[in-house]
Amino acid sequence: MTTILDVIRAPISPSNFSLPFWQATRDKKLLLQYCPRSRRYQFFPRPLSVFTARREIEWRESSGAGVLYTFTIARLGPGGFAAAVPYAIGLIELAEGARILGGIVNCPFEKLAIGMAMVPYWHPIGDGLHLCLFQPAPAAVPSV
């Protein structure tokens, strides 16, 4: 059975403003952009703050810990993902307040619950880079 971990992805071609994010994945670190003027985090990487429209942005490391804000089970998938259906996709609200969309692994669909604690799952994608997926935090998935 093919899973989202088996999908062959196109090589990453970072832009100049997303390069720090992708370089950090080599060390399995999640970097978020921080706007010091608004004191808020944003994700995905952009050339300026979505809160102030200024270029005053800092990169700060996140643990990646958060909660499952919402999720869906994909039953149709584009391209290489078609063979991996069904798979879970979730919107994770990180401790810093930013929300990040990602695949969810290592959890049966019936155990997924809004509000459950999530942590990163670093999946190698070639060239030393990793894709940040998510999995339940230890003890977040009740046993059967």
Image: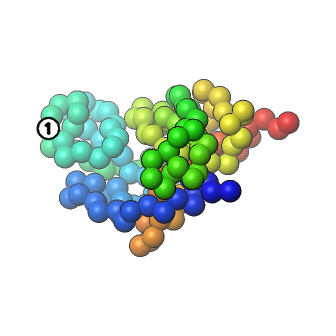
How many neighbours does mark 1 have within 10 angstroms: few (below 14), some (14-19), or many (20 or more)? few
Q: Residue furthest left?
A: 54
Name which residue type carries label 1. Arg
In the figure, is residue 134 to the left or right of 20? right
Depth check: 51 or 92 in front? 92
Q: Residue furthest bottom?
A: 127
Residue 48 horizontal/vertical position (percent): 18, 42
Depth check: 53 or 56 in front? 53
Quarter holding residue 144: top right
Residue sitting at x 22%, y 54%: 17
Whether residue 73 is situated above or below residue 63 in the rendered picture: above
Q: Can the viewer see residue 129 in this picture?
A: yes
- State the residue position of label 1: 54
Instruction: Give the structural element (helix, strand or loop) at label 1.
Output: loop
**Colouring scheme applied when the structure was drawn:** rainbow
Whether residue 86 is situated above or below residue 72 in the rendered picture: below
In the figure, is residue 80 to the left or right of 23? right
In which quadrant will I find the N terminus?
Answer: bottom right
Residue sitting at x 62%, y 36%: 117
Residue 59 horizontal/vertical position (percent): 31, 50
Quarter holding residue 56: top left
Residue 119 horizontal/vertical position (percent): 58, 45
Residue 47 horizontal/vertical position (percent): 19, 46
In the figure, is residue 138 to the left or right of 65? right
Q: Can the viewer see residue 27 in this picture?
A: no
Number of marks drawn: 1
